[in-house]
Image (cartoon, helix red, strand yellow):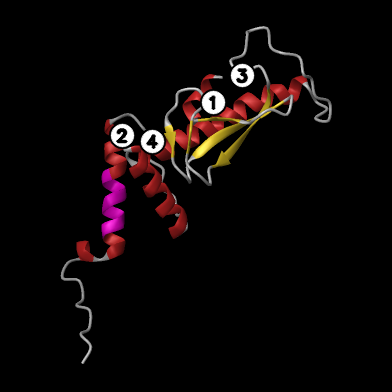
């Protein structure tokens, strides 16, 4: 005989009620910290990737998600002015910026997800497989440059 699941004794034991209670607590904590709370449904494999990376970096998943969102919107904001200044994307200028770039040979950057572990070319932090990074392509055909998110934001 297969045991049947016992019904919840209290409404608070029902999964939907527990989820609602967790949302209310998170929203209250966010208000206390003067932050906003965003809840999102994601596929299980994405959830697992988020928690694995957060664990590998030794940070809470919420902080990892916040960093990813901030980097995405920072990159979008940085890209918008350059599109306005150079409306024809097929025209590429190889002129170096006057500010003395740290990576003068890099023609452009692309956001990637690492397939193999590597280190940041700037700060030497270990970047595990599956982590986000920026790949700099050389104008002269040299080796590409890999940067962590923090170093890419500083370039």
Image location (x, y in percent) of residue 23 = 31, 49
Task: Provide the residue designation for mark 2.
Answer: 31
Task: Provide the residue designation for mark 1.
Answer: 152
Residue 125 is a magenta residue: no
Mark 2: secondary structure: helix
Circle nearer the N terminus (4, 2): 2
Specify the quadrant of the image occupied by residue 87.
top right
Circle nearer the N terminus (2, 3): 2
Quadrant into which the N terminus falls? bottom left
- Give the magenta range: 18-25
Circle nearer the N terminus (1, 4): 4
Q: Decide: marks 1, 3 in contact (CB < 8 A)?
A: no
- Pointer 4 local density, CA inside 10 Å: few below 14, some 14–19, many at least 20: few
Image location (x, y in percent) of residue 64 = 40, 38
Question: Could you tell whether 128 is left or right of 87 in the image?
Answer: left
- Counting labels gives 4
Question: Could you tell whether 149 is left or right of 100 in the image?
Answer: left
| Pick the front one: 124 or 47 | 124
Task: Provide the residue designation for mark 3.
Answer: 103
Q: Looking at the image, which residue is at 76% across and 19% down? A: 85
Q: Looking at the image, which residue is at 20% across and 85% down? A: 3
Secondary structure character of the magenta stretch overall: helix
Q: Nearer the viewer, mark 3 or mark 4?
A: 3
Image location (x, y in percent) of residue 92 = 80, 24
Cα separation between marks 1 and 4 = 26 Å
| Pick the front one: 103 or 87 | 103
- Pointer 2 local density, CA inside 10 Å: few below 14, some 14–19, many at least 20: few
Cα separation between marks 1 and 3 = 11 Å
Task: Provide the residue designation for mark 4.
Answer: 36
The residue positioned farthest toward the left in the image shown: 9
Q: Nearer the viewer, mark 2 or mark 3?
A: 3
Cα separation between marks 4 and 2 = 7 Å
């Amino acid at each position: 005989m297969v045991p049947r699941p016992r019904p919840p004794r209290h409404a608070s034991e029902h999964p939907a009620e527990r989820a609602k209670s967790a949302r209310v607590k998170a929203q209250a904590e966010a208000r206390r910290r003067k932050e906003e709370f965003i809840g999102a449904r994601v596929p299980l494999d994405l959830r697992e990737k988020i928690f694995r990376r957060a664990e590998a970096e030794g940070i809470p998943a919420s902080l990892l998600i916040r960093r990813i969102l901030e980097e995405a919107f920072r990159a979008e904001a940085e890209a918008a002015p350059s599109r306005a200044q150079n409306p024809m994307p097929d025209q590429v200028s190889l002129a170096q910026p006057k500010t003395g770039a740290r990576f003068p040979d890099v023609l452009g950057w692309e956001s990637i997800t690492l397939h193999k572990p590597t280190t940041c070319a700037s700060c030497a932090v270990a970047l595990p497989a599956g982590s986000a990074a920026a790949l700099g392509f050389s104008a002269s055909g040299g080796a590409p440059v890999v940067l962590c998110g923090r170093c890419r934001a500083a370039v």
